[in-house]
Amino acid sequence: MDRDIVIVEQKKVDLSNALVVVGFPTVGLVSTIAANYVVTSLGLERIGAVYSNSFPPAAVVHDSIPMPPVRIYASNIVCGPKGSCEELVVILSEFNPQPNLVKPLADAIVEWCATKAGKCRLIVTLEGIPMDGGPREDLRTFGLGSTSKARDILGGYGIEQLQEGVVSGLSGVLLYEGERLGIDVTCLLAEASPNYPNARAAAKVLEMLDKIIPALHIDPQPLYLEAEKIEAQIKSHLEKARPVTQPFPESPPPGIYR
C-alpha cells in the first residue's frame, strides 16, 4: 500500500463475506450519484475512511457532520450471487483523485479488500461511459468482469458485457489489477453525457446493481427523483470546495510599497 494512502477503520466489522461497491466521480458523476443513493436508501453506517495528504483539502458536510473526502460505509445485508455475501460495503467520494494517485489508491483498495477486510468476496465498481450524440433516454448499459467467474456472474444476471472499448480511471485500474491477481471485480457501466451530472444514467446503473443487491428494491420512478436530489447535493459540494482565486492587480494600489 502506498505510504501516503491510509485506510482507517473507525469501527471493526467482519467483512469476510462482503460485497464492496466503489463509486468515485466519473463521466456524468454516474458512480458517485449511484453510490450515494445506495448509502442513503439502505442506511449504511460509516465505518472508516481513506486518507492521503494529496487528497483535496476539504470536508464534506452532511447533517452538520464534517467528513473526509473518501468514506467507507457498511451494513449487514445479504447480497451478491445467490446471496453469497453477508455484508455490503461502499467506498465513495465526490472528488476525483489526481492521476498520479489513481494506481496507488486502487492498490490500497485491492489490498484492503484482499487482506485486512478478510478477503471480500466481490468488488463492484460503477462507471459512466461517454455516449455518442446528444442527450437521450435510451441509455445503453454494460458490464465487465476481471475474471471468468466475474463474467459468469454478469451473465447470470443477464447483463450485457462490453466487448470492445476503454475503461479509464479507478475502475479501469481495479479491473486490470483484478485480472492480474485473480480477484473478482465487476464494473457496471451506463452511457452518460460528459457535460453534466446525469441522474438518469445513475438510475440505469442502479437498476443493474439491484440485481446484485436485491435489498435496494429499485423502483425506477422515485429513483430518478431521488437521484436528481443527490445530483444537486454533489454539485453543491463541488462548487463550495472549489478554491476562490482573485487576480493580482496589474500595479499596486496607492499606499502599497513598491
Image (cartoon, helix red, strand yellow):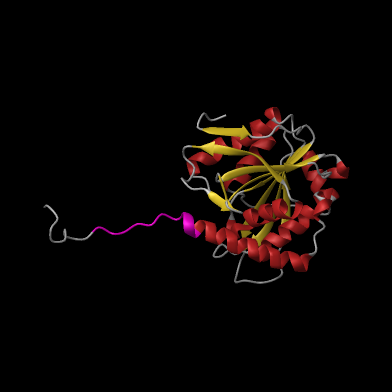
The reply to whether residue 240 is in sight is: yes
* Res. 124 image quadrant: top right
Label total for image = 0
Across and down, in percent, residue 75 comes to 76, 42
Q: In this view, does 78 lie above or below 139?
A: above
Across and down, in percent, residue 177 comes to 64, 36
Give the residue displayed 69% in from the left and 27% down from the top: 115
Q: Residue furthest front?
A: 64
Q: Is residue 65 or residue 214 the one in the foreground?
A: 65
Q: Residue furthest right?
A: 82
**Magenta segment, prevailing SS (helix, strand or loop):** loop
Give the residue displayed 60% in from the left and 33% down from the top: 8
11 left or right, relative to 66: right
Is 247 one of the magenta-colored residues?
A: yes
Quarter of the figure that contains the N terminus: top right
Q: Is residue 106 or residue 249 the one in the foreground?
A: 249
Q: In this view, does 234 lie above or below 50?
A: below
Across and down, in percent, residue 83 comes to 87, 43
The reply to whether residue 160 is in sight is: no
* Res. 76 image quadrant: top right
Is 250 one of the magenta-colored residues?
A: no
Give, as a single range, the part of the protein colored magenta: 239-248
Q: Is residue 40 or residue 174 the one in the foreground?
A: 40
19 left or right, relative to 169: right
Give the residue displayed 60% in from the left and 34% down from the top: 7
